[in-house]
Image: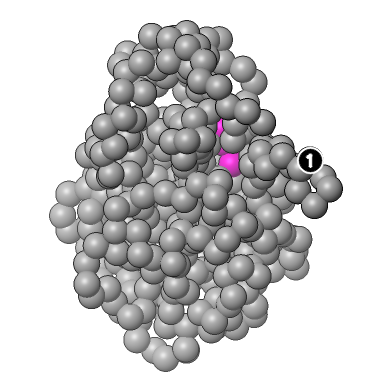
Amino acid sequence: MDYIFSPSIAFVWHRSVFSLLLGASGVAAHSRLVNIVVDGVLYDGYDPKVPNNPDVLAAWGTTVTDDGWVNHEDYRGPNIVCHRDAVNAQGYAPVQAGSTVDVQWQGYPESHKGPVLTYLARCGDGPGACATANKTELEFFLVDSEGLIDPDVDSDEHASAPGYWASDLFRENNSSRVVQIPEDLAAGHYVLRQELIALHYALLPTMGGPQHYPQCVNIEVVGGGDARPAGVRATELYNWDQGVAEGEVVEADPGLEYDISSSPLAEYTVPGPTLYSGAATGVEQTLSTVTSSASAVPEDGAVRTSVVTLRTEPEAVSGSPPVPALVTGSHCAKP
C-alpha cells in the first residue's frame, strides 16, 4: 500500500491538529506497569529506571527506560511479547479462578486513544514453568478487550480526538484495567499479558504507526475448572500491511490502520484473536481496595514470601502513601 498524507488526517476534525502538534514534540514519557492488586494484595511491578529491582517479582523485567513502545516492525519479533528485551519474572502472584486482577500503570497520555487488551498463556502446572518459558513459544488467548466504547461521546471537553475509548476509561480508573480470571480455567501457572495500543499515529507509518505497550506478569491460577484454551504466539497476534509475502497478500488488521480523528468515527474492530468463550465481559472498572502488600512467591519454590498489612480499614487506592506510586494519567507527558 502507498501511504499519502491526506489533509483530512490533520484537519477534518479540529482537535486532531492539537493531537498531531503534540505528537511532533516527541516527548518520551508514555507508560509501564507499576503493580497489580489481587484480592486487596498489592504486588510490585518492575521499574527499568532503577538499577536494583528485587530478584523475585511477579512482573517481567524490560529495558524500557523511556516508558516507550514497540510497533509493527516488531510484530514478528520477541519484543512484541512482553516489551523490549523482556526477561522472565522469577516470582508469581496467586490468583483464585474467577477473581480479578487490577493491573495498574504509570499514567497514560490522553492523546493515546485506542484499545486495551489482556491475554493469558499457560506455562505449566508447577512453579518455575513461567520463569523458564521461552517467551516466543508462549501461546496467548484473549480474556479481556475493549476498543471504541462510544463514538458520539468525547472523553472530556479538551479531548484531542472524538469518541470515548477503552484508553479513556483506563485513564479515569487511575490508569488501570481490572480483569477477571476465567472461572473455568485449569489451575496452573500463566503469564498475564496486558497491552495498550495507541492509535494516534496509526495512519502515519513514517511516524511509527500504531504504538504497542505490552507488559507481563506471572500468576498462579488456583482452583478453577479444566479449561485449557488454545492460543497463538504473540508473534502471530497482529498483521501489518506488507504487500505480498510468500505469495500471499498481507494486509493490516483493521483495528491497527484506523483514523481516530475522522468525524464521524468509523466502526472499530479490536485487533487480535477472538475473545475466549469463557471470559467474563462487562467487568466493573473501579479503583481497587488495597489492604496489604506482598512479595511475589519465588518460582523456585523457596519460601521467601512476606506480607505487610497496610491498613486496618481498607481504603480506595488513590496514589498516596503507604501504597506505592499509583499516579493518574495527567502525570504522564504527551504524547
Magenta segment's dominant SS is strand
Q: Is residue 274 shown left or right of residue 328?
A: right
Which residue does the image show at 54% across and 50% down from the upper left? 73
The quarter of the picture where the C terminus appears is top left
Q: Is residue 149 visible?
A: no
Where disc 1 sits, the SS reads: strand
Q: Is residue 18 placed above or below 80 in the rendered structure?
A: above
Which residue does the image show at 70% across and 47% down from the upper left? 273
Q: Is residue 11 shown left or right of residue 263?
A: left
Which residue does the image show at 62% across and 57% down from the upper left? 76
Question: 180 or 57: nearer the eye?
Answer: 57
Q: Which amino acid type is marked by label 1? A: Val
Q: Is residue 89 visible?
A: yes
- Residue 49 lies, in percent from the top left, at 24, 62
86 falls in the magenta region: no
Q: Quadrant of residue 93?
A: bottom left
Question: Which residues lie in the magenta part?
Answer: 145-149
